[in-house]
Amino acid sequence: MTNEKSTPMLNDMYNGISDITYYKGGTVNGLRFNEKNWILTHAGQLVPYYSEDSPRRKYKASVTFYPDGGLKAVSLDEQQEVVTPIGEMPAELVTFYDTGELKRVFPLDGKISGFWSEEDERGLNIPFNFEFDFTSFNAMLSGLCFYKSGHIKSITLYPDEIIKISLGPGLVLDVRQGFSLFEDGRLRSLEPAQPAKLQTPVGIITAYDPNANGINADNNSLCLDEQGRIKSLVTAGDRIHVFRKSDGTSFTFLPKIVYTEDEIAELLTLKADFDYDGQTILITDADGTEVGFAFDDTFVIYNNVVPTLGCAGGDCSSCSLCGK
């Protein structure tokens, strides 16, 4: 049923409004349709969702708006070709910046449930080709994000897709979940698919985050600066000893395995942030405590010494700890 707050103006603009949601201030947040509409956007002329609910599709508004009335997202009635800064591509969901530029494109927007599996969804996807200075690949995507300028901001891979990315001569990593770019196209961050031993200013550290969520690839566990140096990383298996020269104190950092109230094992990782101007490293331990050191302090690093978590073979669909 159409919300009683529906205004004549909305009914003049759109056909078949079946539901309206509002922000607390009273402006329209989202609309659902049961009749066909066309909306002209930076991504072309779009047809918002209006068909009868399908067990595959997520229940959401056909269109959503920013509080000032600007178009925020369109859930498409069916997959259609949309206009992007890199050419047309198929999409079921698109989002926009508050100034109207295309922000994200999602080739598929299905709901994974008992009625529709991830493999069912994969069967509707298609691979895309990309070429960058650091990689060339053909893979299925979950989403693509653009800067307002139209340059690619991040590419999110479909689950189980693995690509290879070069970090320099002789250093090629398997990457899952995706990667992000600086606006000029240089590599900004990525998600290692397997533990990778990398040279840092304080020694070799194994970069890998088993807890990476993969929602989008805007921010990943291995980050680079604009000069291509390691800016930060997460390690799930290294033990780091540090002897501070300034006061003779020593510290030990290592990931920890903890258990939830439901006896589910979780691995708490370490994070290292590097400041090349200040020649310092900030280590965030498994409990969230941050401690800073100088690059010329003494570091003793033991790679892959924390035992991996065991699991039952049938639990893979809800687990990312082994990176499969």
Image (tube, grey):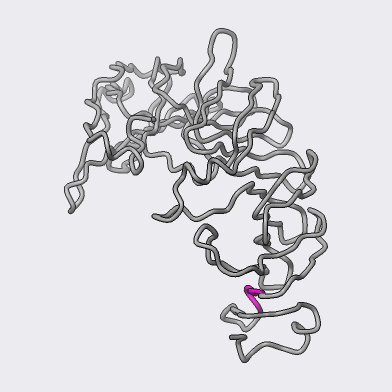
Q: Position of residue 141 (x, y in %)?
A: 60, 38
Image quadrant where one finds the C terminus: top left
The picture quadrant where one finds residue 54 is bottom right
Q: Residue furthest bottom?
A: 4
Q: Position of residue 195 (x, y in %)?
A: 39, 22
Q: Is residue 96 above or below residue 167?
A: below
Residue at 49% of width from left, 38% of height from top? 159
Residue at 22% of width from left, 37% of height from top? 257
Residue at 36% of width from left, 19% of height from top? 297
Q: Is residue 71 above or below residue 251?
A: below
- Highlighted magenta segment, given as a residue range: 28-33
Image quadrant where one finds the N terminus: bottom right
Q: Is residue 55 above or below residue 291?
A: below
Dominant secondary-structure state across the stretch colored magenta:
strand
Q: Classify residue 104 as left or right of residue 202.
A: right
Q: Position of residue 206 (x, y in %)?
A: 38, 21
